[in-house]
Structures are given as C-alpha cells and as structure tokens.
Image (tube, grey):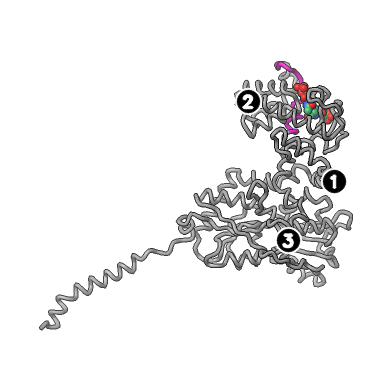
Amino acid sequence: MFSQTAFRRRCTPWVLATGILLLMSGCSEPPKPSTLERIQKEGVLRVVTRNSPATYFQDRNGETGFEYELVKRFAEDLGVELKIETADNLDELFSRLSQPDGPVLAAAGLVGSEGRKRQARFSHSYLQVTPQIIYRDGQTRPSRPEDLLGKRILVLKGSSHAEQLESLKARLPGLQFEVSDAVEVVDLLRMVDEGQIDLTLVDSNELAMNQVYFSKVRVGFDLSDPSSLGWALASGDDNSLLEKTNAFLDKVEQNGTLQRLKDRYYGHVDVLGYVGAYTFAKHLQQRLPRYEGFFRQAAQAHGIDWRLLAAMGYQESLWQPDAISKTGVRGLMMLTQRTAQAMAVSNRLDAKQSITGGAKYLAQIQEQLPAEIVEPDRTWFALAAYNIGNGHLEDARRLTEAEGLNPNKWLDVKQILPRLSQKQWYSKTRHGYARGGEPVHFVANIRRYYDILTWVNLPQLEGSQLAESSLHVPGIDKAGNEKPLPQL
Ligand code: BLG
C-alpha cells in the first residue's frame, strides 16, 4: 500500500512533467498563418474588380486594363498566380471582399472615401482623381453646384459620386439624382453623349481614357478637390498584406512603372489636348468606318497590324483621301510621286490604292532594315524611314553611333534625328539636310493613335454589340437575365 507521502514523492514529478508537456503542446500548436503567408502558401492572389475599360476587360489580345496591369505586377512581385474575379456592381464588390473566404484585395478604381473606410482598409494611393460633372456639348455649361438643380443626373450605385451628391443634398435640398447598378462609367458617358441624360459625375481618369470615344462629352466643373484611388482590403487587424501592398505601390511609384501605366491608359488627353481628343472621337465614328476594310485587307496581305496602318493614316491625313501636303505629297497615306510609282499606285487620291501602296512600302522598308534592329524598335524605325527616307535615317544612326549611343535603339536615335536640320551636323552626313524633327513627332503620334486603337477601343466602340458579348454587359446580370435599365 502506498502512503500518501510516497505517492506524492513518486508521482509529483510525473504529474508535473505531464503538465509541462501538455502546456508545451498547447504552445507549439502552429499559429494561424497571416493573410500574406496564406497567399504565398496557396500561390494565388485573389482580386476582385469591375469589368470596365479603366479597370479590367478582355480584348482580342486577352486580359487588360489599368488595374489589371498593376495588380498583375503585384502578383508577379509576390511570386504567385493572379486570379481575377469581377463583381457586377460596387455593393457586390465590397460584400465579396468582406467574406472570410472571399478575395483578399479589391482593385477597381476605388476612391478611399470616408464611407468606404468604414467597411474596408485602403492602401497607399496610386492615382489622384478629380470628380467631374459631365454635360453634352451644345447645352449650357454647368459651372457650379446650383446648376445641377432640375437636371437629369445619373451616377453609379454605391459609388463615391453617389456619396458626394448625397452630401451635397444637405446644402441643396432640391437636388435630385438617380443611381443605377445596371450600367458602367462608359455607359454614363455614352448616355450624356447621346442626350439620354443631362449630366453625370465621373472621375477625371475615367473621362481621360474615354474622351477619345465620345465627341460630345464635355467637363462642366470639378465637383471637389482631387481624391485618392487605392486598393481596398477587408477590415481586420492582420496587416501583413496591407504592408506588402503599400511597399509594392511605393516601389512602382519610384521606379517609373506606375507613371508608364498612367501614360498608356490615361495620357491621351495630355498628348492630344481636349480639342484633339474630341476631334479624334468624331473622326473615329465618322471617317474610320469607311476605310477600316481597306486597312484590314492591306494589313493582312503584308503581315502588319491593321491598327498600326490606321494610326499611320490618321497621322498622315486624318483619314482624308484627298489630303495634299505643302510638299505635294498626296492621299490618305501621303505617298510621294516616286513611292506611288514604285508601289504601282496609279491614283494617289484613291483611298484603297493609297492604303495598299502605303502598307506595301512600310513592309518593304521594315524588311530591309538591319537585322540588329529588333522589335518593337524595328517598327518605330520603319515608320521613321517611311516619313524621312531610309538614307536620312541611316545618317541619323551613324551620328548616333558617333555619340556613343546605340544606333539600334529608337530611344537613342530619336534624340539625334533633329540634328539633321542643323548645318553643323548635316554637313557631315551622306544625304545632307532633312527635317529631322518630323519623324520624331510622326512616330510618337502614331504610337499614341495606335495605343488608342488597340487597347480600349472594343468596349467603347462596339456599343450596341456589347449586349451580345459576355464581357461588359450593361443591363444583363450574370445569369444572362435582363436587368431593367434605369427609368429617367
Ligand atoms: C516620304 C516618302 C519617302 C521619302 C521621304 O518622304 O514622304 N514616303 C512616302 O512616300 C510614303 O519615300 O524617302 S526617300 O524616297 O528615301 O526620299 C523623304 O523624301 C510623307 C513623307 C513626307 C511627309 N509625309 C509620308 O510620311 C510630308 O508630306 N511632309 C511634309 C509635311 S508639311 O506639308 O510640310 O506639313
């Protein structure tokens, strides 16, 4: 029989050891992984966005859009795969973000407004935008909040704009506006352009990228000071992903990546100016359709992207077959008499012949360029030679090399080209004087028009056909059922 003391003596160490072991096993239970660790372990970054030209959409080349491009780089930075999900409207976007097994990030051109900061956390800002009142050319320009009274105004449901107009009501009780979750920003702009509504409120970046498609759309006034766009994360106290997101956004700001994306998506108006942007929009609707078939045929025959040819045609003549330059060069693609003869063009003022001849000439130049010049520079060099002639381009390449720069890089040669019009330089060249600045503008403008024609053209241009595509479908929900369009 054990005495109590003996039991204590023999068992206490055992009980203690077991207790310690139990305690230790409690402590060694693996801690819950942070959001960032989970993403890295699963190898997937789930992002929710909106399907719109300024955020994310698909064109014939695949997925694209400003938010998509930026968030794709973030996923690459994390070394994980990007999985994009789209929400039909902003309310749905925020509700998905707050689900525990939902996407971890919303990248959708979101203003970090006070209201939204109550339901989500926002990253550092990557873009400053100004909310702008949009009206139709020919109507009286609204210039202050009072001018909104008595107008038909439509904005997106759940948007920061709906929030802003709601708070404006406190000052202007007579203010009325409608909200809709059945449309996207591009539809709002189209509705103003076509006179279906009087006014809308959109962010300056959305306008900048769409201005070239809507010739009647004008800015009335800025409703408030600029606000910041950021990515939204579900609320909570796990900061692992937020910190990583901020570090990434700071990095792309510093290394110029962000600026390049902004230029590509939102820079058109900066380059064209507002008047140039309206004009381009008008010509896109009124002139391009007449020649698009010729561009496509000629492009296909010579293995060129038709939109590059169309961009050249716009730069050369604003798509006018009877254009004549001061130097006697003629037609939609501005062929010299010599080029026309070489390309078997009998009538330079015939649009089809001009386009076919221009395409053939460009393809020929491109083929003859030295093999060391590789794409995409090869295309920019071919365009420069189309404009200034191969001899002068060669002169510029030699001068470039003599300067210790790279004669096969467009970035280097374009710095030197303008010297061809200065005596101290052209006197040393084989082909002498040339208007060296002209091809630099020529190539820059064509690249700009080409960008406009390639990336966002489909959603905007194919307006009525959109209902048939599964991409961006105002008025149709995910199940394919028609949603009623707002009654105004
Ligand atoms: C180009 C020719 C080149 C020619 C160069 O001129 O025309 N391109 C075409 O005909 C397609 O063949 O090179 S060369 O044959 O080696 O000499 C140089 O002569 C046309 C350019 C000239 C330019 N537009 C196509 O880009 C033009 O018209 N410039 C004048 C503008 S303005 O009227 O003074 O404003």
Q: Which residues are magenta?
A: 428-442
Residue at (44, 61) in percent of width and height: 33
The quadrant of the image that shows the C terminus is: bottom right
At label 1, which amino acid type do we have?
A: Gln
Mark 3 vs ligand 1: CB below 8 Å: no
Residue at (65, 67) in percent of width and height: 91
- On the image, the x and y values in percent for residue 22 come to 29, 71
The quadrant of the image that shows the N terminus is: bottom left
- The residue singled out by tag 3 in the image is 474
Query: Which numbered mark, 2 or 1, is in the foreground of this view?
Result: 1
User: Ligand 1 appears in which quadrant?
Assistant: top right
Mark 2 → mark 3, Cα distance in angstroms: 50 Å
Asked if residue 11 is positioned above or below residue 212 in the image, the reply reads below
- The residue singled out by tag 1 in the image is 286
The numbered mark, 2 or 3, whose residue comes first in the sequence reads 2
The numbered mark, 3 or 1, whose residue comes first in the sequence reads 1
Residue at (71, 32) in percent of width and height: 302
- The residue singled out by tag 2 in the image is 407
